[in-house]
């Protein structure tokens, strides 16, 4: 129940998050957490959960995905409850009453993986309404552009748009019920982008509506192991209508209810976490 931070998030960092939709925080996770999670990631790959996804898209290399890992893997559970991640989300979002975990996603691009993460933003997939929604993306290996660093379209969370979800597996499983994402690559000169290369111990915090993508891992010797923990603040409510996000089980709360239950547990303040 520590959740200790090496330092508080500065006001300038919070302002950057809300203005740009993304910030990079350096050195917030110590070596013990990194090594513990490296072992846990490899265990989760060897013993995957029921929501495992093969994200290779028929291309060379391996791209492993899994979700709600915290519900069955003890080290992942410890990470979302006890690591600095939840406290980081609370300070960045400015939550006053609670931070809840929506879910976690394990994303591992092995060396030589050609699988590209397409341009997308997260919240249109999810059964969530609210502004205080973010992902704390924590790498357990050094991440460079070559090995698959995520690229963000600065300020796109403030466009007032919700675009059609993209399939990470290369199919059309989500149909076409929403406005399509613009051809970002064709209009690069119209936008500002940011890419953060990171070291183990760093994390990236991005808003639920910022557009982002990532290349494959063209580095033939370096893995890209990362955990994306999705956190919600005071204003988040459950809205399953039209959601594309499969859940590991039904949450048992009605539409419009605050996003807090056994499946979406409160992770901050730590004294209010479930037993």
Image (tube, rainbow, N blue to C red):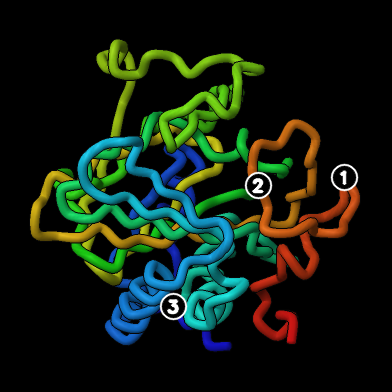
Q: Nearer the viewer, residue 126 or 174?
A: 174
Please name the residue that numbered disc 1 is placed on: 255
- Marks 2 and 1 sit apart, C-alpha to C-alpha, by 16 Å
Mark 1, mark 3: which one is toward the viewer? 1
Q: Residue at 58%, 61% (x, y): give it.
A: 50
Q: Residue at 82%, 55% (x, y): give it.
A: 258
Provide residue 30's location: percent of width, then percent of height. Answer: 32, 81
- Marks 3 and 2 sit apart, C-alpha to C-alpha, by 32 Å
Q: Residue at 39%, 76% (x, y): give it.
A: 43
Provide residue 208's location: percent of width, then percent of height. Answer: 55, 42
Provide residue 160's location: percent of width, then percent of height. Answer: 61, 23
Is any part of residue 73 visible from this angle?
A: yes
Please name the residue that numbered disc 2 is placed on: 246
Point out the tag, 2 or 1, that comes first from the N-terminus: 2
> Mark on residue 5?
3
Q: Are marks 3 and 2 in contact (CB under 8 Å)?
A: no
The secondary element bearing badge 3 is classed as loop
Point out the tag, 1 or 3, that comes first from the N-terminus: 3
Q: Residue at 78%, 41% (x, y): give it.
A: 240
What crowding class fits label 2: few (fewer than 14 Cα within 10 Å), some (14-19), or many (20 or more)?
few
Provide residue 232's location: percent of width, then percent of height. Answer: 65, 56
Q: Residue furthest left?
A: 220
Mark 3, mark 2: which one is toward the viewer? 2
């Amino acid at each position: 129940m520590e959740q200790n931070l090496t330092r508080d998030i500065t006001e300038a960092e919070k302002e950057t998050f809300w203005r740009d939709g993304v910030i990079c925080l350096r050195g917030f996770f110590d070596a013990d957490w990194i090594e513990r999670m490296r072992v846990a990631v490899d265990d989760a790959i060897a013993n995957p959960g029921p929501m495992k996804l093969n994200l290779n898209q028929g291309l060379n290399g391996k791209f492993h995905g899994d979700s709600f890992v915290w519900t069955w893997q003890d080290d992942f559970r410890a990470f979302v409850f006890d690591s600095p991640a939840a406290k980081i989300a609370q300070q960045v979002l400015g939550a006053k009453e609670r931070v809840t975990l929506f879910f976690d996603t394990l994303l591992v691009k092995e060396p030589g993986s050609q699988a590209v993460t397409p341009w997308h933003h997260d919240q249109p997939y999810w059964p969530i309404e609210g502004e205080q929604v973010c992902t704390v993306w924590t790498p357990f290996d050094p991440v460079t552009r070559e090995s698959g660093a995520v690229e963000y379209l600065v300020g796109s969370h403030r466009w007032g748009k919700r675009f059609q979800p993209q399939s990470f597996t290369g199919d059309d499983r989500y149909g076409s019920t929403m406005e399509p994402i613009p051809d970002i690559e064709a209009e690069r000169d119209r936008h500002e982008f940011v890419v953060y290369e990171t070291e183990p111990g760093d994390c990236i915090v991005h808003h639920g509506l910022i557009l982002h993508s990532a290349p494959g891992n063209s580095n033939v010797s370096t893995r890209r192991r990362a955990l994306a923990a999705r956190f919600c603040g005071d204003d988040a409510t459950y809205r399953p209508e039209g959601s594309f996000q499969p859940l590991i089980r039904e949450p048992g709360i009605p539409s419009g209810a605050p996003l807090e239950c056994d499946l979406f547990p409160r992770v901050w303040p730590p004294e209010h976490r479930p037993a």
